[in-house]
Image: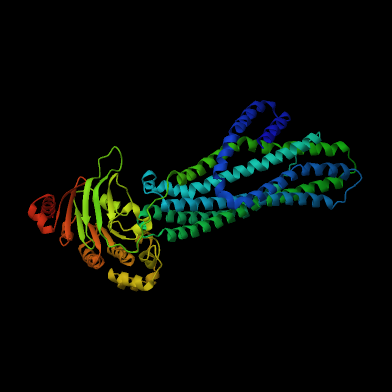
Amino acid sequence: MPRHGARGRIVGNRGIDNRELSCHAGRRIGLLSHMATVLQRITRILPYFKKGRLGIAVAGLASLIAAITEPALPALMKPLLDQGFVGGGIPMWTVPAAIIGLFTLRGFAGFTAQYALTWAANQGVQALRMRLFHHLLRAEPALFTRHSASSLTNMLVYEVQSAATQLVSSVLTLVRDTLTLAALMVYLLYLNWALTLFIGLLFPAVAWVMRTAGRRVQRLTKEGQRANDELAYVVEENVLAWRIVRLHGAGVTQSRRFEQLSNALRRLLLKNVTAAATMTPLTQILAATAMSAVIVIALWQSSAGGQTVGGFVAFITAMLMTLPPIRHLADVMAPIVRGLTALERSVDLVEEGAAERGGSHSVTRAAGRIELDRVTLRYAADQANALEDFSLTIAAGETVALVGPSGAGKSSLVNLLPRFIEPIAGELRLDGVPLREWTIESLRRQFALVSQDVVLFNDTVAANVAMGEVTDVERVRAALKGAHLLDFVESLPQGLASEIGHNGSQLSGGQRQRLAIARAIYKDAPILILDEATSALDSESERAVQEALDVLMRDRTTLVIAHRLSTIEHADRVVAIDAGRLIEQGTHAELLARGGLYARLHALQFRTA
């Protein structure tokens, strides 16, 4: 295709301005030199466009039809002028019929090509988006340290769509203008003259068409922007709350939610394209109507003419019609490369990391015995170890409190258990089975988390409680009752079906915390992790939350991280950690009597208080 375009540029410029030839030739040589690489890059993203193959084929056929109609206009002008002005050899009614019919065919072909290629592109966007979203739900946790939430959101929601739109527009221009230029050049070789036609009275009608269609395009654009925002919101939630989503096995539910919004956005974008693409054929039909009127009047007023008149008009028209495709082809490669680059960035993200891998061990419910055997953890090669040769055994059903200064390694320890991070040495076991031998799904089914940073979704109360599982209304009610939240939920206008807003924005801090506890009760996991679950609450809210936690902790292995040491005095065992090492362990009373790290922290806290 580039060769046709290059040839067209050289021939066309002989009749225009030879001074432009060297500049345009250099740009065309650059296009040719990049074509092989561009084709290789297009091949890389083609698998995502398999569902759009029919649309691509239809777009190619429609572009061919549209290109064939280009030289048909000057070809019609020659017999119309020559025979029509000499003796009235053509019936008057055939003139507008032929011209309007030609432009109608061209407009329909152009609309079909643009819609079909856009449909195919959006099929590819949908496939790539779903692949990216599924990858985010299953990728190794290290992915979230290499990419920020905003960059992932922008890539998945905006960048993929804008890149595909740019690429589609440029490819359509490349195919259409290359075929058009080739058709016109063949006709110019046959003729000696060309034609241009100026229809001044067309502009008011064109302005009316563009204004009328523009209103619909503007409305659909605003709806599309709102749909884009909703889709970005779902991605942001799942990127920021990936630990909660995976811990509760909610990937399928969230993926279904994402797919529904993504399909809604896709439908809006197609409506937008339909409205925008309508303007061009309507404008062309108006131009054809005005042109046919001019020719009919000229034929009616004229009584004689010569053969050279038609040939001259046809040749001038064909020659001037080559100018737009020549200009378009000169600039088409840059947007193609930009679109490919943006799409390749998304493909790179899919291919850069493998999904999480687990073993084959799976049980419905573990007993809850946890062992850490000489575990060492380091986040980066140039950083100190977060945990150093750390060993600890926690019996099933035991409540163990982890205390220590900030940065001691408490959160690192609990993040090792669901395999959100991996140690560089040592081994962790659950019920005597190394964590690596558990399936990821079965391992995370054994843990429930209640943190000070509560993560809630912009959904109903019931959906937030039953996250990742089938919603059982009676179980949801029982969980809310155990979390001391049922009375409040029943007082809401829609009860369990009430929306709670962005991250539970319509709830108080204590209510959000108790909803997280209800979620943990509903999951009924044998191991419970409490990470500063009451640290951000006032005394009244803390009392209500603590009562709910007491219900939740019964008959479960519980790990409690707390800086307020008054909340862990009744733990079965207190483990004091500093600089990634286990310093001491025992009951609250035993450690106070020893006068070690725990006693110093306790004394400092209560003296400060």
Residue occupying the point 29% across, 72% down: 481
- Looking at the image, residue 587 sits to the left or right of residue 501; the answer is left
Residue occupying the point 35% across, 70% down: 476
Q: Position of residue 137 (x, y in %)?
A: 42, 53
Q: Position of residue 493 (x, y in %)?
A: 38, 72
Callout count: 0
Query: From this viewpoint, is residue 335 visible?
Result: no
Q: Position of residue 458 (x, y in %)?
A: 40, 61
- In the picture, which quadrant includes the C terminus? bottom left
Farthest right residue? 87
Pick the residue in front: 519 or 227. Answer: 519
| Displayed quadrant of residue 73 | top right
Query: From this viewpoint, is residue 305 visible?
Result: yes
- In the picture, which quadrant includes the N terminus? top right
Residue occupying the point 72% across, 31% down: 11
Q: Position of residue 482 (x, y in %)?
A: 28, 70
In the rendered image of this protein, does residue 493 appear above or below residue 7?
A: below
Q: How is the image coloured?
A: rainbow
- Looking at the image, residue 214 sits to the left or right of residue 374; the answer is right
Pick the residue in front: 266 or 126. Answer: 126
- Looking at the image, residue 484 sits to the left or right of residue 66; the answer is left
In the rendered image of this protein, does residue 350 appear above or below residue 5?
A: below
